[in-house]
Amino acid sequence: MNITVPPFSLSNSQSEQVSFPSGKASLVCFIKEDCPTCREVIPVLAAMADAVGDTLDFHVIGQTQAGNQTLLETFVPPFDILDDSSLKVSYASDIDTVPTLVWSDGQGKPSQTLIGFVKDEWRALTESLNAEQGVPAPAVDWQNLPDWRPGCGSLSVDPLIADRLRAEAENSPLRARRIDIGVADDEIEFMFDQGFSDGLPLVPPTPERVMRMLAGTRRDPQDVLAQMPPNMGDVTVEKVAINAVMAGCKPEYMPVINTIVQAICTDEYNIHGVMATTMGASPVVVVNGPIRERIGMNMQLGALGQGNRANATIGRAVRLIIRNVGGAKPGGTERSTLGNPMKFTMSFPEWEERSPWSPLHVERGFAEEDSVVSVFTMSSGPTLIVDQDSRSGAGLAGTMGLSLESAFNPKAHYATDCLLVVVPEHVDTFVRDNYSKADIRARIQEVTAKPIGQLMADDISGAGFKPEMVEKMGPGAMDKMMPKFRSEDDIHIVVAGSQAGKFSGAFHGWASGEIGSIPVSRKIDEL
Amino acid sequence: MTTILDPTDERVPVARSISPRPEVIEGSVALLDISKPRGNVLIDRLEELLQQRLPKVEFKRYAKPTFTKPAPDELRQQIQQNNDFVIEALAD
């Protein structure tokens, strides 16, 4: 088997460019410094270089800059060592082993290739050089050389480097490690075995599928969107695309997922705490703006449920990224006591057009025409708020408040926040009374406000305020009125759901504020 | 063969599960020479020793065309279908 060395121009130790082929026949030898066989053949190469003189071009190519320097200083050979530390020539020559010695004609066509060191082969080569090119026999002490020494692996086939070299050579934007699945292996089972899955089957992220997924974003595949805890792994756009393929996404969802990744990897949102808590928290993603329609999200019947690809897979892709790139896995740093099914996926759009109020993203400072993702942390829900009877805004918002009392436990006030999903029939009740979002929030706070004295731990429930805590709060604390939420800003309101049914939903939050997770909204800026 | 891209941060090597190790060696054992120099010498000697210890076991010889490349699919399938075990002489 002959190795064809492609035409190259490499620098020698004096930074001069040396080109191949030059029109003259040549010997090219690939070596690397930490290979014992390469070190052993350097005296042979030295004698050959002397014998060859000007008859042939004689090129020795080394694979690391520091290694080349060490070899030149150690052996002081009569040849220079060319710098192929980029490994491009080694890779393009398709060598597996060093030393590899190639004898080529003036046009670079190979006539003989020697791999490793087999004394008889090397000796025969010098004899052929003598017969065909008139190169005198080199001054080699053949007797004292070993009969045979295996070569070492070329750096260009090092698994850590080879994928990058291949991608560069193919001008491919993909840099992720390639994993070959044996023909006898089932690819779905293999991915389960690798721990890539959330427990459901995954779509195999073949390079072709990942390339198609990347077509959905304008970003460079190697852009690092965030460092994701707990491993602080770099979330590149390529890694997002790989996990999006596995989740079953379409390419046009990519800008949404990229933005969600950036939103959750902020200090405010605190994805690490959200994943690590024993409470079983998980992100809920609300999508606003024109992108909802463009990617076919479902904001109407069953918006929080199954059946729509975009709703289902965007949230799943995010969870897979958290698992695979961030490294948060149940039993590892993910420590949820019960877990909850929202940990598989939870993303939905707001039905802005059915709402009489400003949509969530506008309330949070964005323009109506912006496409925005908002991430909220839930610990339970969506719990249903069933009210088929209230005919007034105050009555309906009152029911919502009483229902929200159950967040954490009814005595837990100032503990969490909530995301209220108001359905169209309930919206209509509010509209009739000209009830604004601010009215709803105020009413919830009003009907849930209780004196601390009624929130004390007692015989019915050991949860609640303890006397020593209240004492520290000073005189009159028992009578202090405390609504469910620390602030009206902790009540987030969106509209979604089908036209029929007076069943709104509420996501109860997790530890709110600085100590826990603060909702984050972010514009999808690549649109 | 399917190739997929690694969805993780690549900090750990890809783990492949090992088949369960049987208590007893019976049936047929494939001896695979990957065609590295002198691999055949090792396998010859191994076969000789194993035949003494396991007279009822059948040994079959296989060779990869070249050590530099993975075994062709056909060869892998042939080994898998006709043997219960495989011993591979890996490298130098």
Image: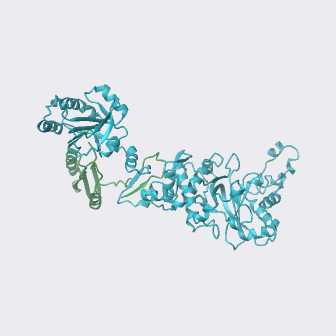
Chain colours: A cyan, B green
Dividing the picture into quadrants, the one containing residue A291 is bottom right
In terms of depth relative to the viewer, which is nearer, A486 or B3? B3
Horizontally, residue A77 falls left or right of residue A287, namely left
Please identify the residue farthest to the front as the structure is shown. A23
Q: Where is A200 relative to A227, above or below?
A: below
Dividing the picture into quadrants, the one containing residue A483 is bottom right
Residue A15 percent across, percent down from the top left: 35, 31
Horizontally, residue A160 falls left or right of residue A121, namely right
In terms of depth relative to the viewer, which is nearer, A99 or B17? A99
Q: Where is A39 relative to A336, above or below?
A: above
Residue A137 percent across, percent down from the top left: 14, 31
Residue A253 percent across, percent down from the top left: 55, 60
| Residue A391 seen in the figure | yes
In terms of depth relative to the viewer, which is nearer, A379 or A264? A264
In terms of depth relative to the viewer, which is nearer, B46 or A451? A451
Residue A421 percent across, percent down from the top left: 70, 63
Q: Where is B10 relative to A391, above or below?
A: above
Please identify the residue farthest to the left as the structure is shown. A131
Horizontally, residue B17 falls left or right of residue A92, namely right
